């Protein structure tokens, strides 16, 4: 289970320019490295969690976004474990 402290530290890590938002480029870098996302998948996921439509994720939007990413990572890990 993720804690709010872990989420906040992760937000700060991925907010490379420190402006308080996760841009598309910052999100794509993470999604590509962590889950192998292409640009289209990143755009789709960002659009789901960018509730105000400004093209970036605020901290509040990032909480839901990151929660979903962690679920996806856990699903992938489970799939690989179950194949053994």
Image: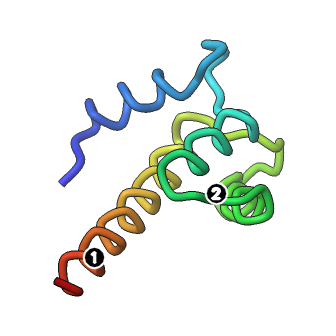
Residue 15 falls left or right of residue 82? right
- Decide which of tag 1 and tag 2 comes sooner along the chain: 2
- Residue at position x 41%, y 68% in the image: 72
- Residue at position x 47%, y 22% in the image: 12
Q: Farthest residue toward the bottom? A: 83
> How is colour applied across the structure in the image?
rainbow
Residue 24 falls left or right of residue 76? right
Label 1 to label 2, Cα distance in Å?
27 Å
Judging depth in this view, the residue of 35 and 83 nearest the camera is: 83
Label 1 Cα crowd, 10 Å radius (few <14 / some 14-19 / many 20+): few
Task: Give the SS element for disc 2.
Answer: helix
Residue 80 numbered tag: 1
Q: Position of residue 53 (x, y in %)?
A: 82, 50
Give the labeled residue for mark 2: 49
Residue 32 numbered tag: none
Label 2 Cα crowd, 10 Å radius (few <14 / some 14-19 / many 20+): many
65 lies above or below 80: above
Judging depth in this view, the residue of 69 and 7 nearest the camera is: 69
Toward which corner of the image does residue 82 lie, by quadrant? bottom left
- Residue at position x 16%, y 83% in the image: 84
């Amino acid at each position: 289970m993720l804690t709010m402290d872990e989420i906040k530290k992760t937000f700060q890590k991925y907010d490379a320019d420190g402006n308080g938002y996760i841009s598309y480029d910052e999100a794509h870098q993470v999604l590509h490295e962590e889950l192998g996302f292409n640009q289209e998948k990143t755009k789709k996921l960002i659009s789901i969690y960018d509730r105000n439509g400004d093209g970036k994720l605020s901290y509040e939007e990032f909480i839901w976004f990151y929660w979903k990413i962690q679920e996806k990572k856990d699903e992938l890990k489970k799939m690989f474990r179950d194949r053994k």
